[in-house]
């Protein structure tokens, strides 16, 4: 990734000095290592250039951190550095990779938002999500690379016997106890690791079983209708919401699009976000937003749920779409294919539940 950054940085004509670029990379690495959900949210807002107020405190803080040992970057360089930081945060080995990849996916809003960056953040997001979903759902191995030592250390036993032979029975006994505790501690750590792996795997198994039963039943509980009876214009949001409620861990299962298609979303119609949100029943709206506080919603990383919230504020009346479009920098009339719409909504629901 570091070499990729040097190439991206050079392509944006921010400087050819290798030392300068290296210090910028060091600042990115330090920021990503300690990144929080809020930090990733600011980086996403910058990368997608959504309603940027460059003097805002949270943006000023990120600008300062990305400055590192150098002068804080200018506005255009800051946007590019933020995108590079997101790319690094999405590395599958990173601690926040699932969260970062999901936030990039939701911010794209079914690719309605243009992304002018030297790297393919959306492609990275999809690859990371797929890799994490596949790796996390793989059955844990019962074979360990390093065999566990269960015998006492010979040198420690010899030292204990020497102490005992010299008349220090207490010291010898304490030495043996220490050696035994080391072995027991290693056994306990190995057991805890195995239990943790299988507990995690069981969670994924429960998720898969719940989803399969849901598909087999073919019933949309929140609308109290079988999948084929759900109005086509309601399917992207209603089905996405129910699938998200069955998801246990970010970024979700690998076959999200297939699951949505099997539930009937592919037979829906092409709709704009404004039309789809306005057409949903009010009772469903209350259920969909239950437990979600307004301060959890973001016009950047949850634009569809933000639209649901804006509509709810007006008690279902029209007139919210224009203001929503200005806050999100999205065209309320832009239409999405049903599967892409449902996937975008699913990612947002999952992000709010698990992020």
Image (cartoon, grey):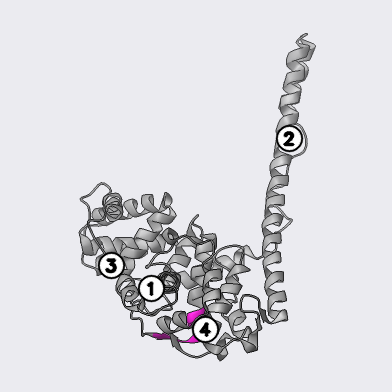
Does residue 22 appear in the picture of this structure? no
Task: Give the position of the N terminus as an image quadrant.
Answer: bottom left
Q: Assign a secondary structure to mark 3.
A: loop
Q: Which residue is label 4 attached to?
A: 339
Instruction: Where is residue 316? Give x, y as percent.
Output: 44, 76
Q: Main secondary structure of the magenta part?
A: helix
Instruction: Where is residue 124? Give x, y as percent.
Output: 44, 70
Q: Which corner quadrant of the image does residue 257 belong to?
A: bottom right
**Chain-order first, disc 1 or disc 4:** 1
The CA span between labels 1 and 2 is 49 Å
Instruction: Between residue 151 and residue 249, name the one nearer to us.
Output: 249
Q: Please name which of the two marks, 1 or 4, marks the residue nearer to the observer.
A: 4
Q: Which residue is label 3 attached to?
A: 51
**Chain-order first, disc 1 or disc 2:** 1
Q: Assign a secondary structure to mark 1.
A: loop
Q: Residue placed at 51% from the left, 76% from the top?
A: 282
Residue furthest top in the image: 167
Q: Which residue is label 1 attached to?
A: 120
The CA span between labels 1 and 3 is 21 Å
Q: Assign a secondary structure to mark 4.
A: helix
Q: Please name which of the two marks, 2 or 4, marks the residue nearer to the observer.
A: 4
Q: Assign a secondary structure to mark 2.
A: helix
**Chain-order first, disc 1 or disc 3:** 3
Against 111, residue 267 (above or below) is below
Q: Please name which of the two marks, 1 or 3, marks the residue nearer to the observer.
A: 3
**Chain-order first, disc 2 or disc 4:** 2
Q: Which residues are magenta?
A: 335-342
């Amino acid at each position: 990734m570091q070499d990729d950054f040097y190439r991206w940085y050079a392509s944006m004509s921010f400087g050819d000095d290798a030392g300068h670029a290296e210090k910028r990379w060091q600042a990115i690495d330090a920021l990503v290592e300690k990144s929080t959900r809020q930090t990733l949210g600011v980086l996403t807002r910058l990368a997608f250039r959504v309603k940027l107020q460059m003097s805002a405190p949270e943006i000023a803080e990120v600008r300062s951190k990305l400055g590192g040992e150098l002068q804080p970057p200018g506005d255009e360089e800051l946007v590019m550095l933020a995108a590079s930081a997101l790319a690094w945060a999405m590395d599958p080995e990173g601690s926040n990779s699932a969260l970062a990849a999901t936030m990039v996916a939701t911010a794209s809003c079914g690719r309605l938002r243009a992304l002018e960056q030297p790297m393919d953040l959306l492609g990275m997001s999809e690859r990371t999500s797929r890799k994490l979903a596949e790796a996390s759902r793989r059955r844990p191995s019962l074979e360990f690379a390093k065999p566990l030592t269960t015998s006492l250390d010979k040198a420690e036993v010899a030292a204990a016997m020497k102490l005992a032979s010299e008349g220090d029975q207490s010291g010898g006994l304490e030495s043996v106890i220490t050696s035994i505790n080391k072995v027991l501690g290693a056994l306990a750590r190995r057991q805890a690791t195995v239990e943790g792996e299988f507990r995690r795997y069981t969670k994924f198994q429960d998720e898969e079983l719940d989803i399969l039963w849901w598909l087999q039943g073919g019933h949309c509980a929140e609308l109290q209708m079988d999948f084929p009876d759900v109005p086509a214009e309601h399917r992207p949001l209603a089905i996405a919401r129910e699938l998200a409620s069955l998801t246990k861990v970010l970024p979700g299962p690998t076959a999200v699009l297939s699951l949505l298609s099997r539930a009937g979303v592919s037979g829906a119609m092409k709709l704009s976000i404004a039309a789809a949100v306005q057409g949903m029943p009010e009772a469903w709206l209350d259920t969909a937003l239950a437990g979600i506080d307004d301060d959890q919603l973001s016009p950047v990383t949850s634009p569809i749920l933000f639209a649901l919230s804006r509509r709810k504020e007006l008690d279902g009346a029209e007139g919210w779409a224009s203001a929503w479009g200005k806050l999100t920098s999205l065209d309320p009339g832009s239409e999405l294919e049903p599967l892409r719409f449902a996937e975008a909504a699913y990612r947002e629901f999952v992000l709010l539940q698990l992020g």
